[in-house]
Amino acid sequence: MNPASQPSFGKGVKLRYDLDGGVMLLVPEGALVLNAPAAAALALVDGERTFAAIVEAVVAEFEVAPERASEDLGTLFERLEERGFLR
Amino acid sequence: MTPRPLSLLCEVTYRCNLQCPYCYNPVALQRYRDELTTQEWCRVLSEAAELGVVQAHFSGGEPTLRRDLVDLVRAASQVGLYANLITQGTFLDDELLDTLLTAGLDHVQISIQAPQAPLADRIAGTVVHEKKLDALRRVGERDVALTLNCVLHRRNHDSIDEVIALAEGLGITRLELANVQFYGWAYRNREALMPTLKQVRHGETVVAAARERLRGRMEIVYVLPDYFGEFPKPCMSGWGNEFLTVTPNGDVLPCPAAAAITDLRFENVRERPLAQIWSESGAFARFRGTEWMPQPCRSCERRELDWGGCRCQAFLLTGNAGATDPACSRSPDHSVVVALRENRGEVEPVPRRV
């Protein structure tokens, strides 16, 4: 994913927080369970923040190398984009 | 430990103004006329949310025939459930749609019977195709997710390319091409609806090519045909594992087709809270997990992928809901499925009636 792109959620896509701390991405006719870094990244998706800024925030919050975070989140975001959950 | 249900199918009514012969609703519908009230449905939704459910799917029959559908969507939304409407779209005018969206509706699935009016209307048993296209356009213009669904069977399977073209023309981003599942009316009409092997193979080729061509623009969900695979579908991701269905009269089923299993007793939300039914009812416990499995499932490396296939199908085809799904090529009863898929008749299907 391009560092300058500003992802936003597709129609009918939203984050859901459970009382037990679990986070899911609810999508048309399905739910994806998210791990903590993925949940933190998607919580920052607002159509304005750039992908680079989102990666930076996740790196600051979790003990993870910037290259690794960029690669993992890039894969996740592209997969979600392909299915129309991010745009 | 009892698993956590994620998804609740609310079959709010079995009434419908269409007569599609592929409907999976039960053939004997009289038992379901005493529908749950608004208040009872609201209680079910809030109990479901407490139980961990995250999505409510409003279906039927035709759910928009319930005058209180907007109240039910609002109730779902208020308890934090993702609200999904599964409709044939003929009553979805501007006013109803906007009220539903204000109430918190997240997603609409609209079905068509075929890509062109004459065939679509013939399958539906009434003139509705143009109305459906209007509804699709109306939903597409609004801020809500939309899926176009078409159930495929022998009478429309050859139009699969045109269904995809229609979806493209309408700007659809999610298309569900669902081969008919043989339950309820569809099971009764299986001889008239069974696709040919040639149609099934053609469908696979068309879908693979369209997925490649439309990557990133349209997601195509392809529901495989019931009787043509090597392995059975992992029905409901396992019995009593993620899914709950509540029928119009309040029966709680692990699968929308489960009422066909006449030797299980399903409990009703009018008599017991949903959470107790989910965790304690014998019908849910009966096929949960892998302990119940016979051979060849028990020692099969796919037992937690397929979950033994579909219990309802096992019952319909062998009389034993605890048998390996005959759709599996390893089932001792697989010859039944082979015979059924060859058994295509030039018979007219029986239109679904209420």
Image (tube, coloured by chain):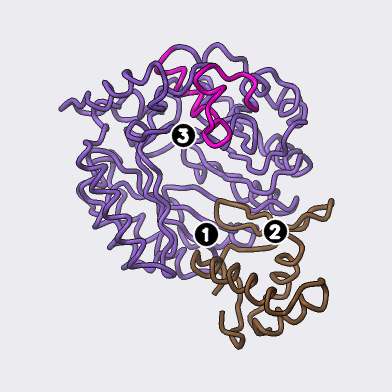
Chain colours: A brown, B purple
Crowding at dot 1, Cα within 10 Å, few <14 / some 14-19 / many 20+, comes out as: some
Residue A30 is covered by the magenta coloring: no
* Marks 3/1 same chain: yes
- Which residue matches tag 3? B15
Quote the CA–CA distance across marks 2 and 3. 39 Å
- Which residue matches tag 1? B97
Quote the CA–CA distance across marks 1 and 2. 32 Å
Which amino acid does the dot numbered 1 rest on? Leu
Find residue B57 and report its horizontal and vertical position in percent: 58, 45
Q: Which mark is residue A34?
A: 2
Quote the CA–CA distance across marks 3 and 1. 20 Å
> Which mark's residue is nearer the viewer, 2 or 3?
2
Residue at image x 34%, y 59%? B133
**Image: magenta residue range:** B289-318
Mark 3 / mark 1, whichever is N-terminal: 3
Q: Is residue B266 above or below residue A8?
A: above
Q: Quadrant of residue B36?
A: top right
Residue at image x 40%, y 67%? B215
Quadrant position of the C terminus of chain B in the picture = top left
Quadrant position of the N terminus of chain B in the picture = top right
Toward the left, the furthest residue is: B346
